[in-house]
Amino acid sequence: MRTHHPEPDWLLAECAGQTDLFFSEFLPDKRRAQKICFDCSIMHDCLAYAVNAKITYGVFGGVVASQRIEMFRALERTEKDQCSPIAV
């Protein structure tokens, strides 16, 4: 079961006002966005929010969409395994 993560206070984010950079499809932009995230005080909250909300675009919490999609899949496998009956 996933934990509820409230939406971060975006006004505290280092990325405030730089949304184009964080939603670019260009790798150099994504790398620059990730560097900004690493100095951000809400980085972990941002990533938790994006994973919980299954956001499949942009850079959130220093993690690009393709990495988060892998996180979603891993979480789904873990949740499925936790719900499966244990063979005795």
Image (spheres, rainbow, N blue to C red):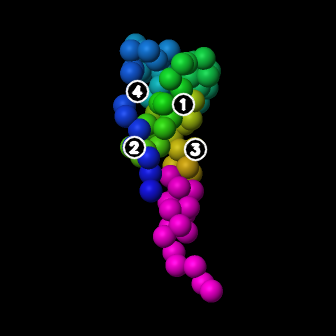
Residue 8 is labelled as 4
Badge 1 crowding class, 10 Å Cα cut-off, few under 14, some 14 to 19, many 20 or more, is some
Q: Nearer the viewer, mark 3 or mark 2?
A: 2
Residue kind at label 4, given as amino acid type: Pro
In the rendered image, the quadrant that contains the N terminus is bottom left
| Magenta highlight range | 72-88
Q: Nearer the viewer, mark 3 or mark 1?
A: 1
Residue kind at label 2, given as amino acid type: His
Q: Are marks 3 and 1 in contact (CB under 8 Å)?
A: no
Residue 20 is labelled as none
* Residue identified by numbered label 2: 4
The answer to whether 3 is drawn above or below residue 47 in the figure is: below
For residue 38, say whether it is visible: yes
Q: In terms of sequence position, does the residue under pointer 3 or pointer 4 come before the other?
A: 4
Q: Measure the alpha-carbon separation of dots 1 and 4.
A: 9 Å
Residue kind at label 3, given as amino acid type: Gln
Badge 3 crowding class, 10 Å Cα cut-off, few under 14, some 14 to 19, many 20 or more, is few
Residue displayed at 37% across by 31% down: 7
For residue 29, say whether it is visible: no
Residue 67 is labelled as 3
Q: Measure the alpha-carbon separation of dots 3 and 4.
A: 20 Å
Q: Measure the alpha-carbon separation of dots 4 and 2.
A: 12 Å
Q: Position of residue 47 (x, y in %)?
A: 50, 35
Residue 44 is labelled as 1
Badge 2 crowding class, 10 Å Cα cut-off, few under 14, some 14 to 19, many 20 or more, is few
In the rendered image, the quadrant that contains the C terminus is bottom right
Give whichever of 10, 6 is nearer the camera.
6
